Image (cartoon, helix red, strand yellow):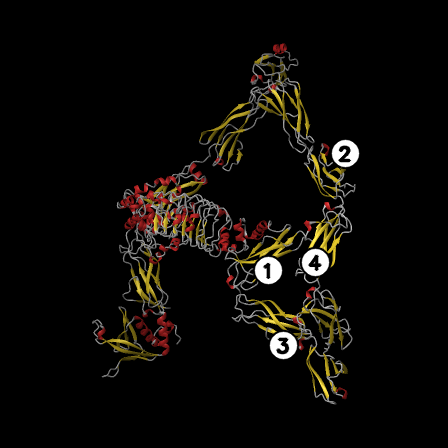
Amino acid sequence: MEAPLESPKAAKLVKPRASAPTVRSVSGTTSSVKKRADGVTSAESNVSRSSSMKPTSTANAGSVQRRSSTGTAGKQQENGRSAVANKASPSLSDGPKKSRAVSVPTVSSRPSLEKRTSLLSERTKVDSVKKPAVKASPTSTLRKVPSLTESSNGTSASASSRRMVSNVSLNSPRSSSVTSSATKKFGSQTSSVDKGSSVLSRRKSSTATSRDSRFMMLPQVDLKASDELRLDSRGHRVRSLKQLRLTPKLEFVYLRDNLLSSLEGIEILNGVKVLDLSFNDFKLPEFEPLENCKVLQQLYLAGNQITSLASLPEFPNLEFLSVAQNRLKSLCMASQPRLQVLAASRNKISTLRGFPHLPSLENLRVEENPLLEMPHLEAASILLVGPTLKKFNDQDLNPSEAEIAQQYPAHTAICIRGGWEFSSPELAADSTFSFLLEQWKNKLPQDCIVKTAYVDQPFEEDPCHCHFSFTNLSSEGNIVLKYQWFLGGKTPTDFVPIPEELSEVYWPKREDVGRCLKVECTPLLNDAEFLPIFAVSLPVCPGTGCPKVINLTVSGELVEGNVLKGVPEIAWCGGTPGKGVASWLRRTWNGNAVIDGAEGMEYQLTIDDINSSLVFMYTPVTEEGVKGEPQCTMTDFVKAGTPSVSNVHIIGDIVEDITIKGNGKYFGGKEGLSKFQWFREKENGEFLLVLSNSIEYTVTKEDVGSHLKFVYTPVNLEGLFNCPCLCHIVGEAREGSKVSVTATVTGGTEGSSRVQWFKSSSSELPYDHEIEALCTSKISKTFRVPLGAVGYYIVAKFTPVAPDGEIGAPAYAISNNVVETLPPGLNFLIVTGEFSEDQMLTASYGYIGGYEGKSLYSWYLHEAEDDEGSPLTEASGLLQYHIKKEDIGKFVSFKCIPIRNDGIAGEPGVFIGKDRVTPGSPTLLSLELNGDAIEGATMVANRRYWGGEEGDTLFRWVLTSCDGTWMEIEGATSSSYSLKCDDIGFYVAVSCVPVRSDGVHGSLVLTEAIGPINPGPPACRSLELAGSMLEGGRLTYHAEYTGGVKGNCIQEWFRLYEGGSKDKLIANECLDLTLADVDCRIEVTFTPVREDGLQGSPKSVSSDIILPGEPKGTSLVLPECFEDNEVSPVKTYFGGQQGTVKYTWFRATEKLENLESDLVASSSEVVGETLVYKPSLDDVGFYLILSWVPTRCDGKTGDTLMAITDNPVMAAFPSALDVSLKQTSSDLYNGVCIYYGGYEGSSLHKWYRESSDGTRICIDGADSSTYEVTDADYSCCLLFGYTPIRSDGVIGEEKISGPSDIIFPEQLQFETLSFKGNQVERETLTVVEQIPSNETQEHIWHNYKKEIKYQWFASNESGADLSFEPLATECSRSYRVQFEDIGRCLKCECFVIDVFGRSSESVSAVTSPILPGIPKIEKLEIEGRGFHTNLYAVRGTYSGGREGKSKIQWLRSMVGSPDLISIPGENGRMYEANVDDVGYRLVAIYTPVREDGVEGRPVSASTEPIAVEPEIYKEVKQKLDDGSVKFEVLCDKDRTPKKAQVMGHLERRILEANRKRIKVVKAGSKTSFPTTEARGTYTPPFHVELYRNDQHRFKIVVDGDNEVDLMVQTRHMRDLVILVIRGFAQKFNSTSLNSLLRIEA
């Protein structure tokens, strides 16, 4: 993209920075630097390039402005690549790897240029606010900022420009000319650019001004790609793609700035990645040829005239799409799955309807579209695109808009795409639901309204409910709802049905997180399925990880011995399903009890659970160990099992006199009084009861040789028992026969026992699961064998029941043989229905004999009962027959031949009706009334008769009024009726009584009333004119109307001229003929109008030619007459066209009663002979008479008519003309005016004063025509008022002149101007003004002075001819002389402003050259951090001429002591502290000295006490706390003081110190022992000295004869040693070092 720069001159004025601004890559823009609104930044970042490429900026300025996308200048923009292009294009992806910072060389500038630069920056900022689109200067070159991919070898700008020109020539028909021109240092490039100048005039969209770089987003040509992969044909006026050599290998195709209007031929580019079609002539949306470009990544269509993107195909790899500056009205197009940037600025987009699905979109740009007027457009875009959107209109998303987007319902995006008008979030819920209801209203059943339709917020693995409710206004059936769930994307799009999810609840899975859900609800009403409606959810949220129980049930029968199973329904909510914790509790009347060992999901009921309810408790637990809330469910009471006994046996030896015992295992609750019985077998096989109610039995003599039987009948506490019985089946096992069961019940009296019948395929007594039930259990012991039992054995289950309800054990019996079938036959045959016309007969029969096959059915008609009859073929094979009219009087029969499924036929059965078929009752099946309910139309009653032959059917026509009353129309008895005029407004109906041919009457039928009956079309049958055809006559017309009740008919009158033209006249039923009608014809047009407003066809008739009347004057009236007012008499003429008329005006002194011509002529004076007369002053007081002779145009005259005024001529009302005022002197004005209106009397004069706010005040005492100005008139205007008064005292209206100029006093003046004060540096000069001594000036100065303005000036140089420059900030009366003013002259100009805002002439005064002041230093201070290792500097403000060699002395001051200790040799502005300064304040004394040697007063400044550097302080404190330390130091072997120390002359020493003494020890060697070179206590004169010129040396002085000179490696070590030694010796110091170090003693 192009970044406009300032002109080269302007660029030189900018003060550059040391380095270029950091280049930022902004997604969605094609500029690598974010251009600011002001042009200064652009100039700053391009100073070096603007100076190095001057030939391009001068010779090609116009060409670059014309076209920024092609040609030489266009290549320059390749240096600034788009961030989007770098991202999308493979060839540009290497750019960032070679990126480096771009530096700008330093350019010298003056302070004045900096001021001008700041002014330019401020002016540019203001202009940028006014102009949203940045345009390039006509003299500037559009140029890109340096690219991040610029080579690092630093090639010159001119060389890169030549390389750019050569690259343009690739694949170009003009490559030779462009290449040759490139060798001329860009000087001759104007010719190549001028060749495209016609394109500029042809298409304004190609200009740089129309291609705003913020919106176009044009691609950069990839210069790294080879010629086989790249085609660059920009600006070659290509009209068709066939002119180009397109190959499938091309990947980068640039066809910008051509004349292409069709994509035909682009199909061959199946490998293209970047396609630039910007600024062509594409209009129609025909993008189908692009379907073959499957690998396309960037598509540029900006600057065309495209109106729609509907045909744009889906590109699987498209990442960038630019359609800016087109004529798009919407963004409706196919889905683009990988599109990241969509640039659609500068279009006509006004709606979001049909917005595509763009799941990867990150940057959306729609600037300069009508769509921007939509409120919260950014929020709507977030809803449509989804969470991938990062930028909107090249700006980061507004957090407030993102919050607003979250307030909209989940289905908002669907509604927006459907055309919903976007509204505020407060109204969105109701508005979108109403929008959906409008779309659903035609899908739902009639009278069915949707009340609710929404989905709960879904969470992972948590049930999500949908809510749909309907209101059925009609009571026909109930609405049944079907559901289907769908899974979509991150936005409510691309929904896919979820298999088998058809319920009201859906459990979102882990893979559903972040995706939207949709559920379709299909209503069913009366088995009719309607179109579905839907609801959409927000994206699925991740689960909390804490499981919860949704439903908890217990399965199993609550009977003792059964197994119960707990069935929990768990929502894992994102956690991993684990094994929950289960437990069972037994609930009784006195509380709950935990069942030991019952901790599984299953539990077997025991006898302890009877009459108790169980509680199943379950706590879900995930594999991560997260426990949910425990839930429990409670069962009903547990019942005891049916009492039973097993393993019944006899214990003991079966020997005479031995007691044996019966035993068995009981089950079924708590055992009650079970029954025990002993039987002995008889010889016939039967058993005899020998003992009851005992489990023991003693074998007797009678038992010897017989079998004994022990019977155990279990009985629980509730009395339920189980006793055995013997039963067998009685009856023949044959189909349809009856069988019964007989049983012998033992163990009590039989009550209402129950029997159930089964069938079995085996003759053995089966188990319950091996038999199939034939009927339910019942009391009846008989049973008819059904067909289903054929081929099976019959089994009877007999359940004995005692009278008290006790139930015994069931017994079974089985038939001896299988059930046999019967031969096919009919056990009954009947025909139901009425044997009458149009009735339906239905045959039914009972079939026996196995399974029925295809039995034969046939119907017959009989003339007599005993004839064979004729078959009815249309009813053959049917069980129903519909009696027809032809069957009347005959017999109907039905014949059935039974046939078994194996084909064996049985005996046929025949049924014949007893009576003949009778005709039906005469009935009208339909009765319709046809015809139009219009007057004169014929209504016809169409009927469908049924019921034998029709006779004379009766008709009656009736009329019904609006209130429901009806009346019969006399004489209307036929099937048709013609509507009459009297029927208008009524409803017509017809009643019909059907009559059969034998005279039988049917029921009366009345049709619905039709109407109301409308009148017929209005019409005019005849039209005639009547009346006199003479001027003044009256014409009327006679019209005959038909067509209902006559309404307000329309009559129109026209005047017909001889030439055929006509004028419409305004008249009603009559027309009075006037002069305009003479010699014309009159035409009347009559339009019939019915009462209801319906109009018929108009009819016209015209008259003969209208003749004129006799000439005469009908009236003549003279109005009131006034002086100088024209008198226009009011007269009326009649009698054709008026000709030349004679008028005569007379003036009479008296009012004449008799206006005869002779009398008037003799007593009056003729004053005029025209129709209009203007009375003069001479006519005032006289009467005026007018004589009029009416004359027709043909010369015929009528009688003379005369009129006289009622009153004499009145004088004119007094008035003033041309009222004005004139200034005769500076303070004297004169009023002037002209009087009119009779003779002037004593007119009045007034003067007014008008202020600036329009307030007008009459000046008291000013009543003459002249006026003298006073002080009150200043700043006001004067007005002159004149009130005319006639001689008879009549007062006219006051007239006021225009205002005079604003009146001001004499201007203020100065006499002289002088200075007060010494004209020396730092002194204050004050201006003293002297005013003139005359009275006027003194008065004006005293009363009207407002303020005095001052301006000080300084001369540039001293001498005779002085030139002064203003001092911008010095505008007061006083001025403090500055250092810069020394040797220069000062001048002060001043002028005075009065209270009226006027300024006087300026006066000035000039000083002599300014002398320097006494040297002085102010604001003296010492800068430094406060530690002993820091550097300190003295700072102050000097004044008093030019400073010379001022004196500075550094001193130390003890805290709390006024004494100062001089530091020798320290007299500079800087001072480096050392350990000697610890605890002291540093003092600097500054003596200012002027360059001529004059000294000023010395000034001092001091620091806070110097502290030890923190790191050294820590070490010193630690060593002092230890109490004894050793340091390794160096000592010079040669003690000559003048000899420089050399490292080779130094020897190692050990410095030992403690709280009492110090010593220096020379270390021992192999040949010597350690020796002490210095030793002593800290008693004075002990001290440690420093060497200021050497930071490594120090001297320890024990006494006058014992001292040692030592060295250490660093200053840090030196300071540490000295501070530790002084710390040990602190008791001998005046100042405690511990206190300085803040160490507790």
Q: Residues within 10 Å of mark 3 (few under 14, many from 20)?
A: some
For residue 354, say whether it is visible.
yes
Q: Does the CB distance between marks 2 and 4 fall below 8 Å?
A: no
Residue 907's quadrant in the figure?
A: bottom right
Q: Which residue is mark 1?
A: 504
Residue type at tag 2: Gly
For residue 1572, say whether it is visible.
no
Query: Sequence order check: which comes first, mark 1 or mark 2?
Result: 1
The reply, left or right, for residue 849 in relation to residue 1285 is: right
Q: Which residue is mark 2?
A: 971
Query: Sequence order check: which comes first, mark 3 or mark 2?
Result: 3
Residue type at tag 3: Ile
Query: Sequence order check: which comes first, mark 4 or mark 1?
Result: 1
Q: Does the CB distance between marks 4 and 3 fall below 8 Å?
A: no
Q: Does the CB distance between marks 3 and 2 fall below 8 Å?
A: no
Residue type at tag 1: Glu
Image position, residue 476 (x, y; %)? 67, 52
Alpha-carbon span between mark 4 and mark 1 = 53 Å
User: Of circles 4 and 3, which is in front?
Assistant: 4
Image height of 984 relative to 1141, above or below: below
Q: Does the CB distance between marks 4 and 1 fall below 8 Å?
A: no
Q: Along the line of sight, which residue is nearer the eye, 760 or 640?
A: 760
Q: Which residue is mark 4?
A: 898
- Identify the element where label 1 is drawn: loop
User: Of circles 2 and 4, which is in front?
Assistant: 4
The reply, left or right, for residue 369 in relation to residue 1544 is: right
Q: Residues within 10 Å of mark 2 (few under 14, many from 20)?
A: few
Q: Which mark is residue 595?
A: 3
Alpha-carbon span between mark 1 and mark 2 = 70 Å
